[in-house]
Amino acid sequence: MSFVGHIRDLAAARRELETRRLLVVGGAPDADRSAFLDAVAREVADEAGLPVYRFRVADAGDRSGEAGRTPGEAADAVVEACRGVFVVHPCVVVVDGVPAGAADAVPTGTADGSLLAGLISAFAESESFLLVGSTDAREGASALPSDGCADGWALLTRAAVHCDRGDPRAAGPLLRRAVEAHQVAGDRRGEAWAVFLYGRMCRLRGRAEDARRLLHIARERFRAVGETPGEAWACGELARLATRSGAPDPDAFAEARRLHERVGDRRGAAWAHLWWTVARADEPGFPWREEFTNVQGRFHEVSDRLGTAWTLHHHALTLARADGTDGVGGTGGTGGTGERRREADRLFEGALALFEEADCPHGRAWTMLEYALRSPAHRFLNGEWAAEIRHVFHGIGDEAGEAWVDLAEAGPSPDGEPPYELACRYPTALLDTLGWTEAGEPLIPRAARDTQPEPRPGFPRPGDRDRPDDSGAHVRLTLLDDVPVPDVPARIALQVVPGPCHPWSTAPLPPLTARATSLGHAEIDPAHGVPADGAEFRFTPHRPGSHRLRFTVEDPATGTVLQQVEAEIDVVPSDPGPHRPTAPAPRPSARRA
Protein backbone atom coordinates (compact mmCIF):
# COMPACT_ATOMS: atom_id res chain seq x y z
CA MET A 1 0.00 0.00 0.00
CA SER A 2 1.30 3.43 -0.83
CA PHE A 3 0.56 6.90 0.51
CA VAL A 4 1.06 10.09 -1.52
CA GLY A 5 0.76 13.73 -0.48
CA HIS A 6 -0.90 16.62 -2.27
CA ILE A 7 2.42 17.79 -3.69
CA ARG A 8 2.66 14.78 -5.98
CA ASP A 9 1.69 15.41 -9.60
CA LEU A 10 -1.51 13.96 -10.98
CA ALA A 11 0.24 11.57 -13.34
CA ALA A 12 2.11 9.83 -10.50
CA ALA A 13 -1.06 9.63 -8.40
CA ARG A 14 -3.03 8.30 -11.32
CA ARG A 15 -0.45 5.57 -11.98
CA GLU A 16 -0.47 4.65 -8.30
CA LEU A 17 -4.26 4.44 -8.24
CA GLU A 18 -4.44 2.29 -11.38
CA THR A 19 -1.76 -0.04 -10.01
CA ARG A 20 -3.09 -0.40 -6.48
CA ARG A 21 -6.73 0.67 -6.90
CA LEU A 22 -6.14 2.54 -3.64
CA LEU A 23 -4.78 6.00 -2.97
CA VAL A 24 -4.52 7.66 0.46
CA VAL A 25 -3.77 11.38 0.51
CA GLY A 26 -2.65 13.12 3.69
CA GLY A 27 -0.67 16.15 4.87
CA ALA A 28 -2.66 18.69 2.84
CA PRO A 29 -5.11 21.51 3.64
CA ASP A 30 -8.75 20.64 3.01
CA ALA A 31 -9.15 22.67 -0.19
CA ASP A 32 -5.93 21.39 -1.79
CA ARG A 33 -6.62 17.80 -0.81
CA SER A 34 -10.18 17.82 -2.10
CA ALA A 35 -9.17 19.43 -5.40
CA PHE A 36 -6.39 16.86 -5.81
CA LEU A 37 -8.76 13.93 -5.15
CA ASP A 38 -11.34 15.34 -7.56
CA ALA A 39 -8.77 15.74 -10.31
CA VAL A 40 -7.44 12.19 -9.95
CA ALA A 41 -10.98 10.78 -9.83
CA ARG A 42 -12.04 12.64 -12.97
CA GLU A 43 -8.97 11.54 -14.92
CA VAL A 44 -9.45 7.86 -14.12
CA ALA A 45 -13.23 7.93 -14.46
CA ASP A 46 -13.20 9.73 -17.84
CA GLU A 47 -10.77 7.29 -19.41
CA ALA A 48 -12.42 4.17 -17.97
CA GLY A 49 -16.00 5.43 -18.42
CA LEU A 50 -16.86 4.94 -14.73
CA PRO A 51 -19.14 6.93 -12.42
CA VAL A 52 -17.69 8.85 -9.47
CA TYR A 53 -19.20 8.83 -5.96
CA ARG A 54 -18.09 11.10 -3.10
CA PHE A 55 -18.47 10.65 0.65
CA ARG A 56 -17.40 12.83 3.56
CA VAL A 57 -17.07 11.41 7.05
CA ALA A 58 -18.66 14.48 8.60
CA ASP A 59 -21.69 14.10 6.31
CA ALA A 60 -22.17 10.53 7.52
CA GLY A 61 -22.58 11.79 11.07
CA ASP A 62 -24.95 14.58 10.00
CA ARG A 63 -27.17 12.26 8.00
CA SER A 64 -27.52 9.88 10.90
CA GLY A 65 -29.38 12.41 12.96
CA GLU A 66 -27.56 11.23 16.07
CA ALA A 67 -25.79 13.72 18.29
CA GLY A 68 -22.43 12.88 19.78
CA ARG A 69 -21.57 10.18 17.23
CA THR A 70 -18.11 8.80 17.95
CA PRO A 71 -15.42 8.59 15.22
CA GLY A 72 -15.76 4.82 15.21
CA GLU A 73 -19.53 5.03 14.65
CA ALA A 74 -19.05 7.57 11.87
CA ALA A 75 -16.46 5.26 10.31
CA ASP A 76 -18.92 2.36 10.43
CA ALA A 77 -21.53 4.53 8.69
CA VAL A 78 -19.11 5.42 5.88
CA VAL A 79 -18.01 1.81 5.35
CA GLU A 80 -21.61 0.64 5.29
CA ALA A 81 -22.51 3.35 2.75
CA CYS A 82 -19.66 2.19 0.51
CA ARG A 83 -20.77 -1.42 0.47
CA GLY A 84 -23.21 -2.93 -1.98
CA VAL A 85 -23.45 -1.45 -5.46
CA PHE A 86 -20.11 0.36 -5.22
CA VAL A 87 -18.35 -2.91 -4.57
CA VAL A 88 -20.30 -4.99 -7.08
CA HIS A 89 -20.16 -2.50 -9.98
CA PRO A 90 -16.86 -0.82 -10.94
CA CYS A 91 -16.72 2.88 -10.11
CA VAL A 92 -14.46 5.50 -8.54
CA VAL A 93 -15.23 6.19 -4.88
CA VAL A 94 -13.76 9.20 -3.06
CA VAL A 95 -13.94 9.19 0.75
CA ASP A 96 -12.74 12.52 2.10
CA GLY A 97 -12.61 14.09 5.54
CA VAL A 98 -11.10 11.04 7.26
CA PRO A 99 -9.82 12.07 10.72
CA ALA A 100 -6.28 10.89 11.38
CA GLY A 101 -7.45 9.06 14.52
CA ALA A 102 -10.10 7.16 12.58
CA ALA A 103 -7.63 6.26 9.86
CA ASP A 104 -5.09 4.53 12.04
CA ALA A 105 -7.27 2.99 14.75
CA VAL A 106 -6.64 -0.64 15.61
CA PRO A 107 -9.01 -3.29 14.21
CA THR A 108 -11.03 -4.85 17.03
CA GLY A 109 -12.36 -8.05 15.54
CA THR A 110 -13.22 -10.14 12.55
CA ALA A 111 -15.67 -7.68 11.02
CA ASP A 112 -14.69 -4.48 12.79
CA GLY A 113 -11.77 -2.09 12.43
CA SER A 114 -10.53 1.37 11.57
CA LEU A 115 -12.11 3.38 8.78
CA LEU A 116 -9.20 2.70 6.43
CA ALA A 117 -9.18 -1.02 7.28
CA GLY A 118 -12.96 -1.17 6.88
CA LEU A 119 -12.79 0.47 3.47
CA ILE A 120 -10.08 -1.94 2.35
CA SER A 121 -12.28 -4.78 3.58
CA ALA A 122 -15.31 -3.45 1.70
CA PHE A 123 -13.37 -3.10 -1.57
CA ALA A 124 -11.11 -6.14 -1.17
CA GLU A 125 -12.76 -8.19 -3.92
CA SER A 126 -14.12 -5.35 -6.07
CA GLU A 127 -12.95 -3.77 -9.31
CA SER A 128 -13.62 -0.25 -8.08
CA PHE A 129 -11.04 2.48 -7.43
CA LEU A 130 -10.82 3.92 -3.92
CA LEU A 131 -9.39 7.33 -2.99
CA VAL A 132 -9.14 8.35 0.67
CA GLY A 133 -8.32 11.81 1.99
CA SER A 134 -7.08 12.52 5.54
CA THR A 135 -7.99 15.76 7.33
CA ASP A 136 -4.60 16.23 9.00
CA ALA A 137 -3.70 19.70 7.69
CA ARG A 138 -0.10 19.86 8.89
CA GLU A 139 2.18 20.33 5.89
CA GLY A 140 4.42 17.34 5.35
CA ALA A 141 2.90 15.48 8.28
CA SER A 142 2.06 11.81 7.99
CA ALA A 143 -1.62 11.57 8.89
CA LEU A 144 -1.68 7.84 8.43
CA PRO A 145 0.44 4.95 9.73
CA SER A 146 3.87 4.22 8.34
CA ASP A 147 4.03 1.95 5.29
CA GLY A 148 5.14 -1.14 7.24
CA CYS A 149 2.54 -0.82 10.00
CA ALA A 150 -0.29 0.06 7.60
CA ASP A 151 0.57 -2.94 5.44
CA GLY A 152 0.42 -5.19 8.49
CA TRP A 153 -3.06 -4.05 9.48
CA ALA A 154 -4.28 -4.12 5.88
CA LEU A 155 -3.02 -7.67 5.49
CA LEU A 156 -4.82 -8.69 8.69
CA THR A 157 -8.02 -7.12 7.39
CA ARG A 158 -7.77 -8.96 4.09
CA ALA A 159 -7.12 -12.25 5.89
CA ALA A 160 -10.16 -11.65 8.12
CA VAL A 161 -12.28 -10.98 5.03
CA HIS A 162 -11.25 -14.32 3.52
CA CYS A 163 -12.15 -16.09 6.77
CA ASP A 164 -15.50 -14.25 6.95
CA ARG A 165 -16.25 -15.40 3.40
CA GLY A 166 -15.52 -18.98 4.42
CA ASP A 167 -12.44 -19.17 2.19
CA PRO A 168 -9.47 -19.53 4.57
CA ARG A 169 -7.10 -20.90 1.92
CA ALA A 170 -5.78 -17.45 1.00
CA ALA A 171 -5.55 -16.23 4.59
CA GLY A 172 -2.36 -18.11 5.54
CA PRO A 173 0.07 -16.24 3.23
CA LEU A 174 -1.50 -12.91 4.20
CA LEU A 175 -1.11 -13.65 7.90
CA ARG A 176 2.52 -14.67 7.53
CA ARG A 177 3.25 -11.37 5.77
CA ALA A 178 1.30 -9.50 8.43
CA VAL A 179 3.37 -11.04 11.22
CA GLU A 180 6.57 -9.96 9.47
CA ALA A 181 5.26 -6.42 8.97
CA HIS A 182 4.27 -6.06 12.63
CA GLN A 183 7.58 -7.49 13.80
CA VAL A 184 9.48 -4.96 11.67
CA ALA A 185 7.33 -2.19 13.17
CA GLY A 186 7.74 -3.58 16.71
CA ASP A 187 3.95 -3.71 17.03
CA ARG A 188 3.11 -6.29 19.73
CA ARG A 189 -0.61 -5.67 19.40
CA GLY A 190 -0.40 -6.36 15.69
CA GLU A 191 1.46 -9.60 16.34
CA ALA A 192 -1.22 -10.64 18.85
CA TRP A 193 -3.98 -10.03 16.30
CA ALA A 194 -2.03 -11.98 13.68
CA VAL A 195 -1.68 -15.00 16.01
CA PHE A 196 -5.41 -14.74 16.83
CA LEU A 197 -6.42 -14.72 13.17
CA TYR A 198 -4.05 -17.60 12.47
CA GLY A 199 -5.81 -19.57 15.21
CA ARG A 200 -9.17 -18.66 13.75
CA MET A 201 -8.03 -19.84 10.32
CA CYS A 202 -6.90 -23.16 11.83
CA ARG A 203 -10.33 -23.57 13.47
CA LEU A 204 -12.03 -23.01 10.13
CA ARG A 205 -9.82 -25.64 8.51
CA GLY A 206 -10.58 -28.18 11.23
CA ARG A 207 -7.07 -28.18 12.73
CA ALA A 208 -8.35 -28.26 16.29
CA GLU A 209 -5.09 -28.69 18.21
CA ASP A 210 -3.28 -25.98 16.26
CA ALA A 211 -6.25 -23.65 16.68
CA ARG A 212 -6.49 -24.28 20.42
CA ARG A 213 -2.79 -23.66 20.96
CA LEU A 214 -2.67 -20.46 18.90
CA LEU A 215 -5.85 -19.02 20.40
CA HIS A 216 -4.51 -19.60 23.92
CA ILE A 217 -1.29 -17.87 22.90
CA ALA A 218 -3.22 -14.97 21.39
CA ARG A 219 -5.35 -14.58 24.52
CA GLU A 220 -2.27 -14.37 26.73
CA ARG A 221 -0.63 -11.83 24.44
CA PHE A 222 -3.77 -9.70 24.39
CA ARG A 223 -3.73 -9.73 28.19
CA ALA A 224 -0.03 -8.78 28.21
CA VAL A 225 -0.63 -5.66 26.09
CA GLY A 226 -3.96 -4.76 27.71
CA GLU A 227 -6.01 -5.50 24.58
CA THR A 228 -9.28 -6.57 26.21
CA PRO A 229 -11.29 -6.59 22.94
CA GLY A 230 -8.81 -9.07 21.51
CA GLU A 231 -9.00 -11.19 24.66
CA ALA A 232 -12.79 -11.29 24.28
CA TRP A 233 -12.57 -12.37 20.63
CA ALA A 234 -10.06 -15.10 21.56
CA CYS A 235 -12.37 -16.39 24.30
CA GLY A 236 -15.22 -16.53 21.80
CA GLU A 237 -13.17 -18.45 19.24
CA LEU A 238 -12.05 -20.95 21.88
CA ALA A 239 -15.69 -21.47 22.82
CA ARG A 240 -16.58 -22.04 19.17
CA LEU A 241 -13.77 -24.56 18.93
CA ALA A 242 -15.35 -26.56 21.76
CA THR A 243 -18.60 -26.93 19.78
CA ARG A 244 -16.73 -29.08 17.25
CA SER A 245 -16.66 -31.90 19.80
CA GLY A 246 -20.45 -31.78 19.95
CA ALA A 247 -20.46 -30.21 23.43
CA PRO A 248 -21.03 -26.44 23.21
CA ASP A 249 -20.09 -24.30 26.21
CA PRO A 250 -22.66 -21.48 26.60
CA ASP A 251 -20.90 -20.15 29.73
CA ALA A 252 -17.75 -19.46 27.71
CA PHE A 253 -19.77 -17.44 25.19
CA ALA A 254 -21.42 -15.54 28.05
CA GLU A 255 -17.99 -14.65 29.46
CA ALA A 256 -16.81 -13.43 26.05
CA ARG A 257 -19.93 -11.32 25.74
CA ARG A 258 -19.29 -9.73 29.17
CA LEU A 259 -15.74 -8.86 28.14
CA HIS A 260 -16.94 -7.25 24.91
CA GLU A 261 -19.57 -5.23 26.75
CA ARG A 262 -17.06 -4.11 29.40
CA VAL A 263 -14.96 -2.32 26.74
CA GLY A 264 -17.92 -1.07 24.72
CA ASP A 265 -17.35 -3.41 21.76
CA ARG A 266 -20.93 -3.65 20.53
CA ARG A 267 -20.15 -5.70 17.47
CA GLY A 268 -18.13 -8.24 19.44
CA ALA A 269 -20.90 -8.46 22.04
CA ALA A 270 -23.43 -9.12 19.27
CA TRP A 271 -21.38 -12.01 17.88
CA ALA A 272 -20.87 -13.53 21.33
CA HIS A 273 -24.62 -13.18 21.99
CA LEU A 274 -25.36 -14.96 18.70
CA TRP A 275 -23.12 -17.95 19.44
CA TRP A 276 -24.44 -18.15 23.01
CA THR A 277 -27.97 -18.31 21.59
CA VAL A 278 -26.99 -20.92 19.00
CA ALA A 279 -25.33 -23.04 21.71
CA ARG A 280 -28.57 -23.10 23.69
CA ALA A 281 -31.14 -23.00 20.88
CA ASP A 282 -31.88 -26.73 21.03
CA GLU A 283 -32.37 -26.80 24.82
CA PRO A 284 -35.99 -27.57 25.81
CA GLY A 285 -37.80 -24.44 26.92
CA PHE A 286 -35.06 -22.01 25.87
CA PRO A 287 -36.66 -18.74 24.55
CA TRP A 288 -34.73 -18.85 21.30
CA ARG A 289 -37.26 -16.76 19.37
CA GLU A 290 -36.78 -13.81 21.72
CA GLU A 291 -33.00 -14.18 21.81
CA PHE A 292 -32.59 -14.37 18.02
CA THR A 293 -34.72 -11.24 17.70
CA ASN A 294 -32.53 -9.44 20.26
CA VAL A 295 -29.35 -10.49 18.48
CA GLN A 296 -30.73 -9.31 15.15
CA GLY A 297 -31.40 -5.92 16.70
CA ARG A 298 -27.81 -5.75 18.02
CA PHE A 299 -26.36 -6.42 14.58
CA HIS A 300 -28.70 -3.88 13.01
CA GLU A 301 -27.38 -1.22 15.40
CA VAL A 302 -23.80 -1.76 14.23
CA SER A 303 -24.73 -2.31 10.55
CA ASP A 304 -23.24 -5.81 10.46
CA ARG A 305 -24.92 -7.61 7.59
CA LEU A 306 -22.87 -10.77 7.95
CA GLY A 307 -23.89 -11.13 11.60
CA THR A 308 -27.52 -10.47 10.67
CA ALA A 309 -27.34 -13.12 7.94
CA TRP A 310 -26.05 -15.81 10.32
CA THR A 311 -28.68 -14.81 12.88
CA LEU A 312 -31.46 -15.25 10.31
CA HIS A 313 -29.92 -18.56 9.20
CA HIS A 314 -29.91 -20.08 12.70
CA HIS A 315 -33.30 -18.59 13.57
CA ALA A 316 -34.79 -20.18 10.44
CA LEU A 317 -33.03 -23.47 11.19
CA THR A 318 -34.49 -23.54 14.70
CA LEU A 319 -37.96 -22.75 13.41
CA ALA A 320 -37.76 -25.45 10.74
CA ARG A 321 -36.67 -28.05 13.32
CA ALA A 322 -39.10 -26.97 16.07
CA ASP A 323 -41.45 -29.64 17.37
CA GLY A 324 -44.42 -27.33 17.77
CA THR A 325 -43.09 -24.91 20.38
CA ASP A 326 -41.23 -21.65 19.97
CA GLY A 327 -39.43 -21.78 23.28
CA VAL A 328 -42.01 -19.58 25.01
CA GLY A 329 -45.14 -21.67 24.77
CA GLY A 330 -46.09 -21.65 21.08
CA THR A 331 -48.82 -23.85 19.66
CA GLY A 332 -48.52 -26.99 17.66
CA GLY A 333 -50.84 -28.66 15.21
CA THR A 334 -50.90 -28.68 11.42
CA GLY A 335 -51.68 -24.98 11.13
CA GLY A 336 -48.86 -24.05 13.50
CA THR A 337 -46.42 -26.24 11.58
CA GLY A 338 -47.38 -24.63 8.29
CA GLU A 339 -46.97 -21.13 9.68
CA ARG A 340 -43.58 -21.97 11.16
CA ARG A 341 -42.46 -23.37 7.82
CA ARG A 342 -43.54 -20.21 5.98
CA GLU A 343 -41.77 -18.04 8.55
CA ALA A 344 -38.63 -20.17 8.26
CA ASP A 345 -38.76 -19.80 4.47
CA ARG A 346 -38.89 -16.00 4.81
CA LEU A 347 -35.92 -16.03 7.18
CA PHE A 348 -33.89 -18.33 4.92
CA GLU A 349 -34.62 -16.03 1.98
CA GLY A 350 -33.55 -13.00 4.00
CA ALA A 351 -30.33 -14.71 5.08
CA LEU A 352 -29.57 -15.77 1.53
CA ALA A 353 -29.97 -12.22 0.23
CA LEU A 354 -27.68 -10.83 2.93
CA PHE A 355 -25.02 -13.49 2.37
CA GLU A 356 -25.03 -12.60 -1.32
CA GLU A 357 -24.70 -8.88 -0.55
CA ALA A 358 -21.87 -9.55 1.91
CA ASP A 359 -20.14 -11.87 -0.61
CA CYS A 360 -20.06 -14.80 1.82
CA PRO A 361 -20.29 -18.00 -0.28
CA HIS A 362 -19.84 -20.18 2.82
CA GLY A 363 -23.01 -18.83 4.43
CA ARG A 364 -24.82 -18.80 1.10
CA ALA A 365 -24.08 -22.49 0.43
CA TRP A 366 -25.21 -23.60 3.91
CA THR A 367 -28.37 -21.51 3.67
CA MET A 368 -29.18 -22.91 0.24
CA LEU A 369 -28.71 -26.43 1.59
CA GLU A 370 -30.84 -26.00 4.71
CA TYR A 371 -33.51 -24.09 2.76
CA ALA A 372 -33.71 -26.90 0.21
CA LEU A 373 -33.92 -29.58 2.93
CA ARG A 374 -36.61 -27.79 4.95
CA SER A 375 -38.68 -26.56 1.99
CA PRO A 376 -39.53 -29.42 -0.42
CA ALA A 377 -41.39 -27.06 -2.75
CA HIS A 378 -38.29 -24.89 -3.05
CA ARG A 379 -36.12 -27.92 -3.77
CA PHE A 380 -38.38 -29.51 -6.36
CA LEU A 381 -38.69 -26.25 -8.30
CA ASN A 382 -34.99 -26.59 -9.06
CA GLY A 383 -33.96 -30.01 -10.31
CA GLU A 384 -30.29 -29.04 -10.14
CA TRP A 385 -30.42 -27.83 -6.54
CA ALA A 386 -27.72 -30.21 -5.31
CA ALA A 387 -25.35 -29.44 -8.18
CA GLU A 388 -25.78 -25.71 -7.62
CA ILE A 389 -24.96 -25.96 -3.91
CA ARG A 390 -21.98 -28.23 -4.60
CA HIS A 391 -20.72 -25.62 -7.06
CA VAL A 392 -20.76 -22.90 -4.37
CA PHE A 393 -18.97 -25.14 -1.84
CA HIS A 394 -16.46 -26.15 -4.50
CA GLY A 395 -15.72 -22.51 -5.27
CA ILE A 396 -14.21 -22.02 -1.80
CA GLY A 397 -12.57 -25.44 -1.66
CA ASP A 398 -15.00 -26.76 0.97
CA GLU A 399 -15.00 -30.51 0.29
CA ALA A 400 -16.67 -31.14 3.64
CA GLY A 401 -19.62 -29.00 2.55
CA GLU A 402 -19.86 -31.01 -0.67
CA ALA A 403 -19.92 -34.20 1.42
CA TRP A 404 -22.94 -32.92 3.37
CA VAL A 405 -24.74 -32.29 0.06
CA ASP A 406 -23.93 -35.88 -0.99
CA LEU A 407 -25.40 -37.12 2.29
CA ALA A 408 -28.56 -35.07 1.78
CA GLU A 409 -29.04 -36.60 -1.67
CA ALA A 410 -28.23 -40.18 -0.64
CA GLY A 411 -30.20 -40.33 2.61
CA PRO A 412 -29.34 -42.44 5.68
CA SER A 413 -27.12 -45.46 5.14
CA PRO A 414 -28.59 -48.91 5.90
CA ASP A 415 -25.98 -49.62 8.59
CA GLY A 416 -26.39 -46.21 10.22
CA GLU A 417 -22.70 -45.37 9.75
CA PRO A 418 -21.72 -41.91 8.44
CA PRO A 419 -20.16 -41.81 4.96
CA TYR A 420 -16.39 -42.05 4.74
CA GLU A 421 -16.01 -38.45 3.48
CA LEU A 422 -17.60 -37.18 6.70
CA ALA A 423 -16.13 -39.75 9.09
CA CYS A 424 -12.58 -38.93 8.01
CA ARG A 425 -13.12 -35.19 8.63
CA TYR A 426 -15.30 -34.77 11.73
CA PRO A 427 -15.00 -36.06 15.31
CA THR A 428 -17.18 -39.04 16.16
CA ALA A 429 -18.87 -37.03 18.94
CA LEU A 430 -20.12 -34.47 16.42
CA LEU A 431 -21.33 -37.06 13.92
CA ASP A 432 -23.17 -38.86 16.73
CA THR A 433 -25.46 -35.81 16.95
CA LEU A 434 -26.51 -36.22 13.30
CA GLY A 435 -30.25 -36.90 13.16
CA TRP A 436 -32.88 -37.71 10.53
CA THR A 437 -36.44 -36.59 10.02
CA GLU A 438 -39.28 -39.02 9.33
CA ALA A 439 -39.06 -37.92 5.70
CA GLY A 440 -35.42 -39.02 5.55
CA GLU A 441 -33.86 -35.53 5.60
CA PRO A 442 -30.66 -35.03 7.62
CA LEU A 443 -30.62 -32.83 10.71
CA ILE A 444 -27.04 -31.66 10.23
CA PRO A 445 -25.26 -30.63 13.46
CA ARG A 446 -25.01 -26.86 13.75
CA ALA A 447 -21.27 -27.05 14.46
CA ALA A 448 -20.65 -28.71 11.09
CA ARG A 449 -20.88 -25.32 9.39
CA ASP A 450 -18.21 -23.81 11.68
CA THR A 451 -15.34 -25.69 10.03
CA GLN A 452 -14.15 -26.97 6.68
CA PRO A 453 -12.03 -29.91 7.88
CA GLU A 454 -9.65 -31.79 5.62
CA PRO A 455 -9.37 -35.61 5.74
CA ARG A 456 -7.34 -36.93 8.66
CA PRO A 457 -4.06 -38.51 7.50
CA GLY A 458 -4.11 -42.28 7.66
CA PHE A 459 -7.87 -42.54 8.30
CA PRO A 460 -8.83 -46.04 7.07
CA ARG A 461 -11.05 -46.28 4.05
CA PRO A 462 -14.23 -48.40 4.40
CA GLY A 463 -12.63 -51.47 2.84
CA ASP A 464 -9.62 -51.23 5.14
CA ARG A 465 -11.36 -50.84 8.51
CA ASP A 466 -11.52 -54.55 9.22
CA ARG A 467 -8.22 -55.32 7.52
CA PRO A 468 -5.50 -53.28 9.19
CA ASP A 469 -2.26 -53.11 7.23
CA ASP A 470 -0.23 -55.28 9.62
CA SER A 471 2.24 -56.16 6.88
CA GLY A 472 3.27 -52.57 6.12
CA ALA A 473 5.57 -50.03 7.74
CA HIS A 474 5.01 -46.34 8.32
CA VAL A 475 7.00 -43.25 9.26
CA ARG A 476 6.47 -41.59 12.66
CA LEU A 477 7.61 -37.99 13.22
CA THR A 478 7.95 -36.50 16.70
CA LEU A 479 8.65 -32.86 17.56
CA LEU A 480 10.99 -33.08 20.56
CA ASP A 481 11.17 -29.41 21.54
CA ASP A 482 8.71 -26.70 22.52
CA VAL A 483 6.74 -24.56 20.08
CA PRO A 484 9.09 -23.67 17.18
CA VAL A 485 10.00 -19.99 16.83
CA PRO A 486 12.00 -18.24 14.09
CA ASP A 487 15.77 -18.78 13.97
CA VAL A 488 15.79 -21.29 16.87
CA PRO A 489 16.51 -24.95 16.03
CA ALA A 490 13.83 -27.49 16.96
CA ARG A 491 14.54 -31.23 17.00
CA ILE A 492 12.46 -33.70 15.00
CA ALA A 493 12.83 -37.47 15.47
CA LEU A 494 12.04 -39.85 12.61
CA GLN A 495 11.24 -43.54 13.14
CA VAL A 496 10.28 -46.29 10.75
CA VAL A 497 7.62 -48.38 12.53
CA PRO A 498 6.93 -51.81 10.99
CA GLY A 499 3.56 -53.52 11.42
CA PRO A 500 3.27 -56.81 13.40
CA CYS A 501 3.39 -58.92 10.23
CA HIS A 502 6.19 -56.97 8.55
CA PRO A 503 9.53 -58.83 8.28
CA TRP A 504 11.27 -55.97 10.09
CA SER A 505 9.11 -56.48 13.17
CA THR A 506 11.24 -59.47 14.23
CA ALA A 507 14.57 -58.36 12.78
CA PRO A 508 16.68 -55.20 13.05
CA LEU A 509 15.90 -52.44 10.61
CA PRO A 510 18.18 -52.38 7.58
CA PRO A 511 20.44 -49.32 7.15
CA LEU A 512 17.76 -47.21 5.45
CA THR A 513 18.39 -43.55 4.62
CA ALA A 514 15.97 -40.78 5.53
CA ARG A 515 16.43 -37.62 3.45
CA ALA A 516 14.99 -34.35 4.80
CA THR A 517 13.93 -31.38 2.64
CA SER A 518 12.48 -28.02 3.67
CA LEU A 519 9.79 -26.73 1.30
CA GLY A 520 9.82 -23.17 2.64
CA HIS A 521 11.92 -20.53 4.38
CA ALA A 522 13.68 -22.85 6.79
CA GLU A 523 16.78 -24.99 7.13
CA ILE A 524 16.92 -28.62 8.16
CA ASP A 525 20.09 -30.34 9.22
CA PRO A 526 21.53 -32.89 8.61
CA ALA A 527 20.30 -33.60 5.10
CA HIS A 528 20.33 -37.38 5.75
CA GLY A 529 19.77 -39.65 8.71
CA VAL A 530 19.63 -43.39 9.43
CA PRO A 531 16.35 -44.47 11.12
CA ALA A 532 17.96 -47.62 12.52
CA ASP A 533 20.35 -45.43 14.50
CA GLY A 534 17.63 -43.03 15.64
CA ALA A 535 17.38 -40.35 12.93
CA GLU A 536 17.12 -36.84 14.38
CA PHE A 537 16.93 -33.57 12.45
CA ARG A 538 17.24 -29.92 13.48
CA PHE A 539 14.56 -27.71 11.94
CA THR A 540 15.39 -23.96 11.91
CA PRO A 541 12.61 -21.75 10.49
CA HIS A 542 13.39 -18.19 9.42
CA ARG A 543 9.89 -16.74 9.63
CA PRO A 544 6.63 -17.47 11.46
CA GLY A 545 3.74 -19.29 9.86
CA SER A 546 3.14 -22.77 8.50
CA HIS A 547 6.21 -24.65 7.20
CA ARG A 548 6.19 -27.84 5.13
CA LEU A 549 8.88 -30.49 5.44
CA ARG A 550 9.38 -33.55 3.27
CA PHE A 551 11.04 -36.77 4.44
CA THR A 552 12.01 -39.46 1.92
CA VAL A 553 12.94 -42.95 3.15
CA GLU A 554 15.12 -44.90 0.73
CA ASP A 555 16.84 -48.27 0.54
CA PRO A 556 20.44 -47.33 -0.40
CA ALA A 557 21.19 -50.92 -1.45
CA THR A 558 18.66 -50.81 -4.30
CA GLY A 559 18.14 -47.05 -4.67
CA THR A 560 14.40 -47.56 -4.11
CA VAL A 561 12.19 -44.90 -2.53
CA LEU A 562 10.17 -46.79 0.08
CA GLN A 563 8.02 -43.97 1.45
CA GLN A 564 7.70 -40.20 1.27
CA VAL A 565 5.81 -38.13 3.81
CA GLU A 566 5.19 -34.42 4.32
CA ALA A 567 4.48 -32.61 7.57
CA GLU A 568 3.25 -29.11 8.39
CA ILE A 569 4.70 -27.33 11.44
CA ASP A 570 3.34 -24.02 12.72
CA VAL A 571 5.94 -21.47 13.84
CA VAL A 572 4.81 -18.65 16.15
CA PRO A 573 6.44 -15.20 16.16
CA SER A 574 8.09 -15.63 19.57
CA ASP A 575 8.20 -18.19 22.35
CA PRO A 576 4.93 -17.87 24.37
CA GLY A 577 6.04 -20.24 27.12
CA PRO A 578 6.57 -23.95 27.72
CA HIS A 579 4.39 -26.17 25.62
CA ARG A 580 4.70 -29.72 24.35
CA PRO A 581 2.98 -29.94 20.95
CA THR A 582 1.69 -33.07 19.35
CA ALA A 583 3.72 -34.77 16.66
CA PRO A 584 3.35 -33.30 13.17
CA ALA A 585 0.96 -35.42 11.15
CA PRO A 586 2.71 -37.06 8.16
CA ARG A 587 0.93 -37.17 4.82
CA PRO A 588 2.01 -40.36 3.01
CA SER A 589 2.53 -40.44 -0.71
CA ALA A 590 1.30 -43.25 -2.92
CA ARG A 591 4.48 -45.25 -2.44
CA ARG A 592 4.79 -47.17 0.80
CA ALA A 593 7.24 -49.63 2.28
Image: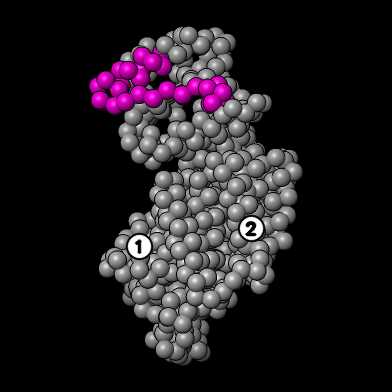
Nearer the N terminus, badge 2 or badge 1? 2
Q: Name the front one of labels 2 and 1.
A: 2
**Pointer 1: what residue?**
389
Q: Does residue 500 sit above or below 102 in this rendering? A: below
Where does the image place residue 544, in percent across and percent down from the top left?
54, 47
| Front in this rendered view, residue 306 or 531 | 306
Real-space Cα distance between discs 2 and 1?
31 Å
Where does the image place residue 381, in percent across and percent down from the top left?
29, 66
Query: Residue sitting at 60 percent across and 56 percent down?
Result: 292
Q: Amino acid at mark 1?
A: Ile
Quadrant of the image for the C terminus? bottom left
Question: Under tag 1, what secondary structure?
Answer: helix
Residue 366 seen in this snapshot: no
Where does the image place residue 417, in percent across and percent down from the top left?
46, 84
Q: Amino acid at mark 2?
A: Glu
Q: Main secondary structure of the magenta part?
A: helix
User: Crowding at label 2, few (<14), some or many (≥20) Cα neighbours within 10 Å?
Assistant: few
